[in-house]
Image (spheres, rainbow, N blue to C red):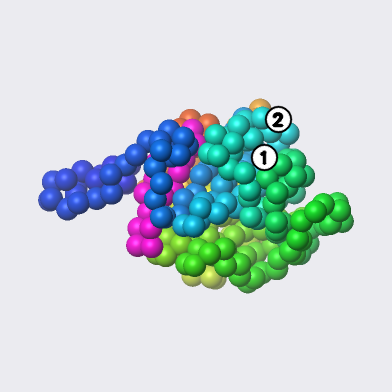
C-alpha cells in the first residue's frame, strides 16, 4: 500500500519517519501524546468514529445500531472515556443513530449536532443536551487547529463533513448521491482521507470526485447482513487509494500532528 511504500523509501534513503504503534497500544491508553486522533471503530453493525482532541477531549460521530451497543460501549470504556463533549449525527437511520440517547446519558454529552433538515429534532430536544442544527458551510471549532465544517446537508437529515487538524483533512461523507458528489467537487478539496458513505454499498464516491480530490486513504464501515459494492472498492483502488474495510482490518486509528498523519490499523 502507499503508506508501506513510503516507509520503505524512507528507510532506503535514510529519512526518519514516525514509528508505528499498534492499535492495541492506543486502545489500552498505553501511549499518551499531545496529538489529535480519529478512531474509526469496527463494530458488528453500523458506524461510529471517535475524535480525541490534543487536550484529551472527546467527540463522537454517529453511534451505530442497537445491535452494536455493547461493543460500542465496551470500546469507549476500554479507552477510559467518561465524558463526550459533542455528538455529531451524519445520518438518522438506525445504523448511525440508534444509540444516540444512550450515549448522551451515559457519557454526559454536552452538545448534539444535527442537520438543519433533521427529522428527529423534536425527539432529541427532549434530552438534556444543547441542540445545534447545522447547515451548509457552518464551522465548528472543537479545539485549536481542530475543526469540523459542514459541506452539505440533504432533506433526509444527512450531512457530509470536513474534519481538519493542521495539514490533515478528512472528507466524512454522509450522503450517497451523484448530485452531492458534483457539489462536493466544487469545493475544490484535497483531503488526505475519505470516509465512504453508505457502507460502500451505493454510488459514492464517483470517479470524478476521486479524480478531483485525490485522497490517499479510504475508510469503509460495515453494515450487518449487507455486502459492499465491489465496484466502489475497485474504483478506490484504481486511484491508488489504500482501502481500509473495517470488517477486515478492525478498528483503524488516524494519529495526527499539525504537519502529518499516520494510519494505525
Q: Identify the disc placed on residue 6.
A: none
Residue segment shown in magenta: 250-265
Furthest residue in direction left, as rendered:
13
Dot 2 crowding, Cα within 10 Å, few <14, some 14–19, many 20+: some
In contact (CB < 8 Å): disc 1 and disc 2:
yes
Q: Nearer the viewer, residue 61 or 205?
A: 61
Horizontal side of 216 relative to 203 (left or right) equals left
Judge whether residue 174 can be spotted in this image. Answer: no
Provide residue 195's location: percent of width, then percent of height.
Answer: 53, 50
Provide residue 7's location: percent of width, then percent of height.
Answer: 24, 45
Identify the element where label 1 is drawn: loop
* Residue lying at 28% horizontally and 44% vertically, measured from the top left: 19
Q: Which of 33 and 168 is in front in this view?
A: 33
The CA span between labels 1 and 2 is: 8 Å
**Relative to 167, residue 218 above or below:** above
Horizontal side of 26 relative to 197 (left or right) equals left
Q: Name the residue under label 1.
A: 64
Which quadrant is home to the N terminus? Answer: top left
Provide residue 63's location: percent of width, then percent of height.
Answer: 67, 43
The answer to if 221 sits in the magenta stretch is no
Residue 100 lies in what quarter of the image?
top right
Q: Mark 2 points at which residue?
A: 67
Amino acid at each position: 500500500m502507499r503508506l508501506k511504500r513510503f516507509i520503505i523509501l524512507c528507510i532506503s534513503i535514510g529519512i526518519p519517519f514516525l514509528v508505528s504503534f499498534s492499535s492495541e497500544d492506543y486502545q489500552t491508553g498505553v501511549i499518551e501524546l499531545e496529538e489529535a486522533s480519529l478512531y474509526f471503530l469496527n463494530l458488528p453493525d453500523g458506524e461510529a468514529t471517535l475524535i480525541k482532541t490534543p487536550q484529551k477531549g472527546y467527540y463522537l460521530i454517529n453511534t451505530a445500531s442497537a445491535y452494536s451497543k455493547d461493543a460500542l460501549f465496551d470500546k469507549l470504556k476500554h479507552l477510559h472515556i467518561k465524558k463526550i463533549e459533542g455528538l455529531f449525527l451524519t445520518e438518522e437511520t438506525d445504523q448511525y443513530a440508534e444509540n444516540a440517547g444512550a450515549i448522551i446519558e451515559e457519557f454526559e454529552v454536552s452538545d448534539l449536532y444535527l442537520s438543519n433538515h433533521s427529522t428527529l429534532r423534536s425527539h432529541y430536544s427532549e434530552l438534556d443536551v444543547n441542540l445545534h442544527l447545522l447547515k451548509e458551510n457552518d464551522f465548528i471549532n472543537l479545539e485549536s487547529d481542530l475543526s469540523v465544517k459542514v459541506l452539505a446537508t440533504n432533506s433526509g437529515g444527512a450531512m457530509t463533513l470536513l474534519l481538519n487538524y493542521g495539514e490533515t483533512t478528512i472528507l466524512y461523507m454522509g450522503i450517497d448521491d451523484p448530485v452531492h458528489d458534483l457539489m462536493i467537487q466544487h469545493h475544490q478539496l484535497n483531503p488526505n482521507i475519505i470516509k465512504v458513505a453508505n457502507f460502500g454499498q451505493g454510488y459514492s464516491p464517483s470517479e470524478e470526485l476521486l479524480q478531483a480530490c485525490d485522497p490517499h486513504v479510504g475508510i469503509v464501515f460495515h453494515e450487518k447482513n449487507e455486502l459492499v459494492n465491489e465496484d466502489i472498492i475497485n474504483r478506490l483502488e484504481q486511484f491508488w487509494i489504500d482501502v481500509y474495510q473495517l470488517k477486515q482490518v478492525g478498528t483503524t486509528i488516524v494519529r495526527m500532528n499539525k504537519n502529518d498523519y499516520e494510519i494505525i490499523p
